[in-house]
Amino acid sequence: MTASLYPGTIYLLFFLSGAAALVYQVVWVRSLTLVFGGSHQAVTAVLVAFMAGLALGGWSIGRVVDRVRRPLALYGWLELGIAAFALLFLGAMRIYPAVYVTLARGRDDSVAYLFVVRALFSVLALIVPTTLMGGTLPVLSRFVSRQPETLRSSLALLYGLNPLGAVLGAPLCANDGETPVPPGITVEGGERCPGHGDPEEVEELTAAASRRQGGHV
């Protein structure tokens, strides 16, 4: 009975893994660019950290997965780790705006400096969960390769289901074009979020949020 359930379960895991990865990517990237701004340098810094983590995970975990006796259990631990660090990301978003303002104030013309700061912040926030995320596909692939021929022959289908899940994840992140606000910056009453990573603007919004939160205590 268990063997008969394996193919459908593995297909579903590959599909949902792709959907979850896309949701994570959109939320993380858009939250960080809300702090850093929407310039192409800011977006590039975040995407570099994201893609570096995926590559690192695929390479490092892929190297050792052949020695894992229970790859499906390892996959479960990887997904739990990603979820745990996603929660930690929310905490980081509470302190990033103030720290970024301190480091970036008066450095608007220092493009290289701001890129390094943004990349460093992005790496600190994303490198661990994206590394775990990059290891999920090699781990599931290793599990499938150890199964009967009927499942191994569908490996190409499994790889196709992963990006198909990402296609599903895209509309799940749609919010009518509005930028999601990380919990560290509370925007109320129609106030706009910092659009270009201006430290002064971030500082003003952060201070306003602190005053509002203090008034509710």
Image (cartoon, helix red, strand yellow):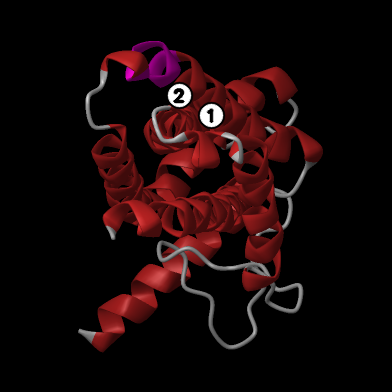
The residue tagged with tag 1: helix, strand or loop?
A: helix
Occupied quadrant, residue 71: top left
* Main SS class of the magenta portion in the image: helix
**Quarter of the image with the C terminus in it:** bottom left
Residue 175 forms part of the magenta stretch: no
Is residue 117 visible in the rendered image? The answer is: no
Q: Nearer the viewer, residue 76 or 35?
A: 76
Give the magenta range. Answer: 60-65
Q: Which residue is mark 2?
A: 57
Labels 2 & 1 near each other (Cβ < 8 A)? yes
In the image, residue 26 above or below residue 106: below
Q: Who's the residue at 64% across and 85% down the image?
A: 190
Judged from this view, the residue extending furthest toward the top is 63
Residue 164's x, y, as percent? Answer: 69, 54
Amino acid under disc 1: Leu
The x, y position of residue 184, in whole percent, is: 41, 61
Q: Residue at x 34, y 47 (%)?
A: 79
Q: Is residue 192 left or right of residue 149?
A: right
Q: Callout 1: 10 Å neighbours few (<14), some, many (20+)? A: many
Q: Residue at x 65, y 26 (%)?
A: 115
Distance between mark 2 and mark 1 Cα atoms: 5 Å
Q: Quadrant of the N terminus?
A: bottom left
Q: Would residue 174 appear left or right of 154 to someone viewing this image?
A: right
Report the amino acid beneath label 2.
Answer: Gly
Q: Which mark is residue 83?
A: none
Locate residue 154, reporting x and y percent: 61, 41
Say if residue 108 shows up in the picture. Answer: yes
Is residue 126 shown above or below 109?
below
Residue that numbered label 1 is attached to: 54
> Horizontal placement of 165 versus 150: left or right?
right
Residue 191 position (above or below residue 137): below
Residue 31 drawn above or below residue 124:
below
